[in-house]
């Protein structure tokens, strides 16, 4: 596929421009490292395009401030100061630092996930943002905290050209079915396997 030329042109009656303006639903899944990292890289591209960006972290706690959050919020502040790029809003709604469930904390975590999804849902109806990053969103789905059918219908039928990127392991087949892009990151090797803890600048 040289220079981004597709292998085949679909017979859908759309022009090349119309196809390029279609809303994307991107899913980064699998057991490998880099799902959130890739989503944040996409958010940087979106900021450069002047898009309004909203990041919702469904598992990570707001107490754990990451490098990508500091960087994107700084870019949001630059937008407010100079008009460059786009606005950035960040919501860390979880209570954990990882995708692992915390024993005894599940009711609060589930309630927080439902509240966060209700906010995302309302903003989609309003066409509030150009890009939504739903980080670790697969876990509330696979754990049964959210109604999968409702989520799929809302994402599939969202109005306008609102782009969404979702991260997390074990993305449900129903979500994969409606996605425009799905990348499965497969772990081949990771320092965690040999007992090494996370590194600054690499994991956060």
Image (tube, rainbow, N blue to C red):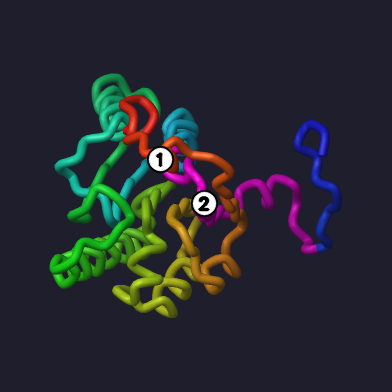
Q: Is residue 40 visible?
A: no
Q: Mark 1 points at which residue?
A: 192
Label 2 packing within 10 angstroms: few (<14), some (14-19), many (20+) = many
Residue extent of the magenta highlight = 12-37
Residue 185 in sight from this viewpoint:
yes
Picture quarter containing residue 178? bottom right
For image coordinates 24% across by 69% down, the residue present is 114
Q: Where is residue 144 in the image (x, y as percent from the top left)?
A: 34, 76
Q: Is residue 64 above or below residue 58?
A: above
From this viewpoint, which residue is outermost toward the top? 82
SS type, badge 1 = helix
Q: Residue 195 at x, y = what percent? A: 37, 39
Give yes or no for contact between labels 1 and 2 (Cβ–Cβ under 8 Å): no
Q: Residue 112 carries which label?
A: none
Q: In this view, does 150 lie above or below 126?
A: below
Label 1 and label 2: CA atoms lie apart by 20 Å
Residue at (33% x, 46% y) in the render: 54
| Left-right relation of 106 to 131 | left
Q: Considering only vertical position in the picture, is 145 above or below 97? A: below
The answer to which image quadrant residue 173 occupies is bottom right
Element type at mark 2: strand
Of residues 110 and 160, the one nearer the viewer is 110
What residue sits 61% from the left and 54% below the top? 181
- Which mark lies nearer to you, 1 or 2? 1
Percent of width and height locating residue 30? 52, 55
Residue under label 2, please give it: 28
Q: Residue at x 47, y 34 (%)?
A: 41
Q: Is residue 21 magenta?
A: yes
């Amino acid at each position: 596929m040289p220079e981004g030329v597709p292998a085949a042109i679909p017979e859908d009656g759309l022009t090349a421009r119309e196809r390029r303006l279609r809303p994307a639903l991107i899913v980064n899944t699998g057991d490998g490292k880099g799902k959130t990292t890739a989503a944040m890289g996409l958010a940087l591209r979106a900021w450069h395009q002047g898009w309004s960006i909203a990041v919702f972290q469904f598992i990570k706690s707001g107490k754990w401030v990451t490098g990508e959050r500091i960087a994107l919020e700084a870019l949001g502040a630059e937008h407010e100061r100079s008009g460059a790029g786009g606005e950035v809003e960040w919501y860390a709604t979880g209570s954990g630092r990882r995708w692992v469930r915390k024993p005894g904390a599940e009711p609060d975590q589930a309630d927080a996930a439902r509240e966060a999804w209700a906010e995302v849902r309302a903003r989609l109806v309003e066409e509030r943002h150009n890009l939504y990053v739903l980080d670790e969103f697969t876990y509330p789905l696979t754990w049964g905290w959210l109604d999968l059918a409702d989520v799929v219908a809302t994402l599939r039928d969202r109005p306008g050209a609102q782009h969404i990127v979702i991260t997390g392991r074990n993305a449900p087949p129903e979500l994969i079915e409606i996605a425009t892009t799905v990348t499965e990151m497969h772990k081949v090797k990771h320092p965690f396997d040999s007992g090494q803890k996370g590194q600054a600048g690499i994991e956060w």
